[in-house]
Image (cartoon, rainbow, N blue to C red):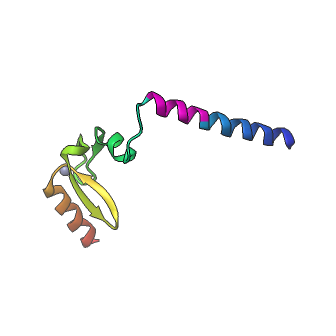
Amino acid sequence: MQRFILYLILFCVGYILFKRIAKSLMGPPSSDEKDSAADADLIRDPQCGTYFLKQRGVKGVVDGKVIHFCSEECYEKYLKRRAGK
Ligand SMILES: [Zn+2]
C-alpha cells in the first residue's frame, strides 16, 4: 500500500513537470490561454457536420454553453431543432 502511494506521488510530480515543460514549449502563456489555443482549431458544426475553422464560424450560446456553427443558418436550424424536441 505504501508503495502504491509512493508511485501515485511520483506520477503526480511527473505529470506536473510534464505539463510545465509542455507549456514552456508552446510559448508564453496568455491571459485567455484556452481561447487563443483553440482559435485555430478545426471544429465540427453540430448541425450540418461540416468542419470549419473556429474563428470563421458563428458563436452561439445554447443552454449556457458556447457552441460554434459554420453559419448563422446552422445556428438557427440547431435552435429550431432543439425547440422542436
Ligand atoms: Zn453548418
The one of 41 and 47 positioned closer to us in this rendering: 41
- Residue 19 place in picture, x, y as percent: 54, 36
Query: Does the magenta-highlighted stretch encompass residue 46?
Result: no
Spot occupied by residue 56 in the image (x, y as percentages of width and height): 18, 44
* Image quarter (top left, top right, bottom left or bottom right) of the N terminus: top right
The quarter of the picture where residue 52 lies is top left
Tell me which residue sits at (32%, 42%) in the image.
36
Left or right: 27, with 1 as reference point: left
Q: Main secondary structure of the magenta part?
A: helix
Q: Residue pushed farthest right?
A: 2
Within the magenta stretch, is there residue 20? yes
Q: Which residue is rendered at x = 69% and y = 36% of the image?
A: 11
User: For residue 72, which quarter of the picture?
Assistant: bottom left
Q: How many marks?
A: 0
* Position of residue 71 in the picture relative to residue 20 (left or right): left
Tell me residue 47's x, y (percent): 24, 54
Question: Residue placed farthest to the top in the image?
Answer: 25
Extreme residue in the left direction:
73
> Which residue sits at x=60%, y=33%?
17
Tell me the quadrant of the picture where the C terminus can be found: bottom left
As displayed, is residue 15 above or below residue 32?
above
Check the image and report above or below for 85 versus 15: below
Residues drawn in magenta:
17-25
Q: Is residue 15 left or right of residue 64?
A: right
Residue 50 placement (x, y as % from top left): 22, 44
Residue drawn at point x = 73 percent, y = 41 percent: 8
Q: Is residue 80 above or below residue 68?
A: below
